[in-house]
């Protein structure tokens, strides 16, 4: 397995490969100091490289001599005995590198003076790799060994290795390995990196439950660990979905095990309670522009495969429109602009039928608006109509399909970011026709009233992206322009409890952006930044991902089109949705009617579509 150095080299790393490329034989290139991470099957972390590149050649030479003494067995004074292996080493080296060994050899217990020390609970190959790391400063990790190395490093209290492995696993988290990662981290206790990774793995399990229960890792779970996973679900129906799926992998052996837990559980499984099919969250990128005119096209990301694919296009070309998802998982797209034509029109997309329909138009034309769903209605806030930066606000009642005028903003603004936080709306930044804005307004739907927050953002921002972090009681605001043409990469965080704004240096974007979009995914374990334009006035197709553990933005995927002034939302899609059938037909090169016949003639009734939905996962 190929590998390369993991170091703090100042050299600029190569750009990541396309996520759809075959990376099975490529090296993983990792740069320690917050630069690009390119996942692949194996890597080497060279902990000595930082000291060496700083000019400490003597230290590097001493390390090489120490490795040579160890490899020849010179002056070794202890032997670590693990199942299937015996590892000779020097007590002082082990004690210096591992608090576990330091305590073992200095405690006065018999292991402190015996030549052979038995470590029956440790993984042999992982321990040998970690001992090699103690001497050489290089840690070789592959997909086959990383979980064992993480578990053994935790036993040895080598916290820097624990964090390194957790960071890498966070980058590689996907449907096929989330169960294994959860099981490993759940056993490691409360160390912060393990807890964050465990939470992300659990979010992956919950988000893609239908796919997870079909994996080998889920099928091989022991009952005790399965019950620890089911305990994370509050909905009893979902708990029984998990139990039922686990039993189905080996009914003869597992039905008695589950029935023995409680007679009631056994009876419920036999009754096979009807549970509504779960929908898979998909990310939709809507409209925008990348040249002289706006885009009609819409594309969708299947996070399970990392693949973007086209869905039905809108009736109107739109950039800087508003898009919301309603509880029935349909997209409502509002207003926007095409060239110098500003729009009132509204249309709705149903992923299940892969089709658009018109809804009643807004009262006013609006582009550069904010849009959000709240309390049964769709709100549109502010915007620009070609002459005025609007303070007006409208609400579409989805039940009656009637537009109502709501209380206006204190400050007319376009290019704002609009988020829902704590059951209220926050209108953030924008442009009022004279200046770029730092101010933020909060809307209380119970009182139909806007209030200016006492504390403004640290920087004026027109065209930023924003999202709410419910678990952290915070709002993040990314990028935007501080004045015309001056785009920013900085990120600010609003503490909803205190109302204070702080610079979030760790989440600064990879480059300066405006006209981009942001959203949280996997219970906000991942944050995504999509599209926009950069400081070179280039339109962007890249999608970058930030997670709380690595505290880095990494390239996730590339949209099919460059998009500035786009909208991005998440909606649930069933496996039989029309948008997925259209993708499958396109990939198969089939006429839709022929594809339906092939699908109907397959034993599962889904034909090649089921196979397409289980492609190799994207890292």
Image (tube, rainbow, N blue to C red):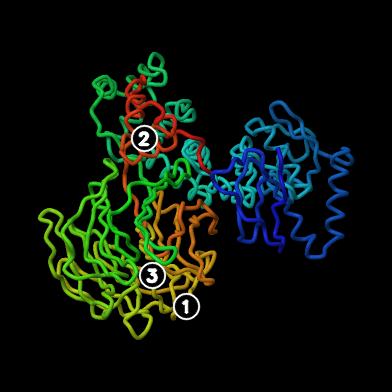
Q: Quadrant of the N terminus?
A: top right
Q: Residue at x 41, y 60 (%)?
A: 518
Residue assigned mark 2: 230
* Residue 290 seen in the current view: yes
Residue assigned mark 3: 494
Q: Is residue 377 left or right of residue 342?
A: left
Q: Is residue 416 left or right of residue 79?
A: left
Write down the quadrant of residue 237 in the picture. top left
Q: Is residue 545 left or right of residue 594?
A: right
* Relative depth, front residue between 238 and 483: 483
Residue 261 placement (x, y as % from top left): 33, 23
How far apart are the alpha carbons under marks 1 and 3? 25 Å
Q: Residue at x 69, y 27 (%)?
A: 83
Residue assigned mark 1: 485
Q: Nearer the viewer, mark 1 or mark 2?
A: 1
Q: Earlier in the sequence, mark 3 or mark 2?
A: 2
Q: Is disc 2 placed on a helix, strand or loop?
A: helix
Q: Is residue 95 left or right of residue 246?
A: right
Residue 337 placement (x, y as % from top left): 31, 67
Q: Indicate whether 75 appears above or below 257.
A: below
Q: Nearer the viewer, mark 1 or mark 3?
A: 1
How far apart are the alpha carbons under marks 1 and 2? 51 Å
* Residue 546 seen in the current view: no
């Amino acid at each position: 397995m190929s590998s390369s150095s993991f170091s703090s080299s100042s050299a600029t790393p190569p750009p990541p490969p396309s996520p759809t490329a075959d990376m099975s034989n490529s090296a993983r290139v990792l740069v320690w100091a917050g630069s690009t991470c390119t996942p692949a099957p194996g890597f080497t972390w060279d902990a000595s490289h930082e000291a060496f590149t700083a000019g400490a050649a003597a230290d590097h030479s001493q390390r090489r001599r120490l490795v040579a003494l160890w490899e020849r067995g010179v002056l070794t004074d202890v032997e670590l005995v693990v199942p299937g292996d015996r590892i000779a080493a020097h007590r002082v080296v082990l004690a210096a590198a591992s608090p576990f060994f330091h305590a073992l050899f200095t405690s006065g217990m018999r292991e402190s003076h015996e030549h052979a020390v038995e470590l029956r609970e440790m993984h042999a190959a992982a321990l040998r790799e970690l001992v090699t790391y103690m001497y050489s400063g290089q840690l070789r990790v592959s997909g086959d060994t990383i979980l064992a190395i993480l578990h053994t490093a935790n036993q040895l209290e080598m916290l820097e290795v624990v964090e390194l492995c957790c960071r890498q696993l966070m980058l590689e988290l996907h449907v096929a390995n989330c169960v294994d990662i959860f099981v490993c981290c759940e056993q490691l206790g409360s160390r912060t990196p393990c807890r964050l990774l465990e939470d992300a793995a659990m979010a992956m399990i919950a988000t893609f439950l239908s796919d997870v229960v079909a994996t080998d890792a889920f099928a091989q779970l022991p009952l005790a660990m399965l019950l620890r996973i089911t305990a994370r679900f509050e909905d009893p129906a979902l708990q029984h979905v998990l139990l039922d799926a686990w039993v189905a992998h080996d009914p003869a052996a597992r039905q008695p095990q589950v029935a023995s837990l409680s007679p009631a559980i056994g009876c419920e499984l036999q009754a096979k309670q009807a549970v509504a099919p779960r929908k898979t969250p998909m990310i939709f990128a809507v409209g925008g522009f990348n040249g002289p005119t706006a885009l009609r096209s819409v594309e969708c990301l299947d996070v399970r495969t990392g693949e973007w694919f086209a869905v039905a296009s809108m009736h109107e070309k739109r950039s800087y429109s508003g898009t919301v998802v309603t509880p029935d998982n349909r997209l409502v797209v509002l207003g926007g602009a095409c060239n110098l034509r500003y729009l009132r029109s509204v249309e709705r997309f149903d992923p299940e039928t892969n089709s658009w329909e018109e809804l009643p138009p807004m009262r006013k034309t609006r582009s550069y608006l904010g849009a959000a769903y709240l309390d049964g209605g769709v709100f549109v806030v502010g915007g620009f109509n070609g002459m005025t930066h609007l303070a007006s606000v409208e609400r579409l009642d989805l039940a009656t399909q009637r537009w109502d005028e709501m209380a206006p903003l204190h400050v007319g603004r376009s290019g704002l970011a609009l988020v829902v936080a704590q059951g209220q709306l926050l209108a953030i930044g924008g442009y009022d026709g004279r200046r770029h804005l730092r101010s933020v307004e909060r809307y209380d739907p119970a009182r139909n009233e806007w209030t200016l927050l006492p504390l403004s953002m640290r920087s004026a921002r027109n065209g930023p992206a924003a999202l709410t972090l419910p678990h952290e009681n915070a709002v993040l605001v990314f990028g935007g322009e501080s004045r015309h043409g001056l785009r920013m990469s900085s990120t600010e965080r609003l503490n909803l409890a205190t109302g204070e704004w702080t610079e979030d240096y760790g989440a600064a974007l990879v480059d300066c952006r405006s006209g981009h979009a942001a959203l949280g995914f996997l219970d906000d374990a991942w944050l995504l930044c999509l599209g926009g334009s950069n400081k070179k006035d280039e339109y962007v197709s890249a999608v970058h991902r930030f997670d709380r553990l690595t505290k880095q933005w990494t390239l996730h995927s590339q949209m099919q089109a460059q998009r500035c002034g786009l909208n991005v939302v998440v909606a649930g899609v069933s496996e039989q949705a029309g948008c997925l059938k259209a993708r499958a037909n396109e990939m198969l090169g089939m006429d839709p009617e022929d594809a339906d016949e092939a699908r109907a003639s397959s034993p599962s009734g889904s034909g090649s579509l089921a196979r397409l939905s289980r492609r190799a996962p994207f890292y």
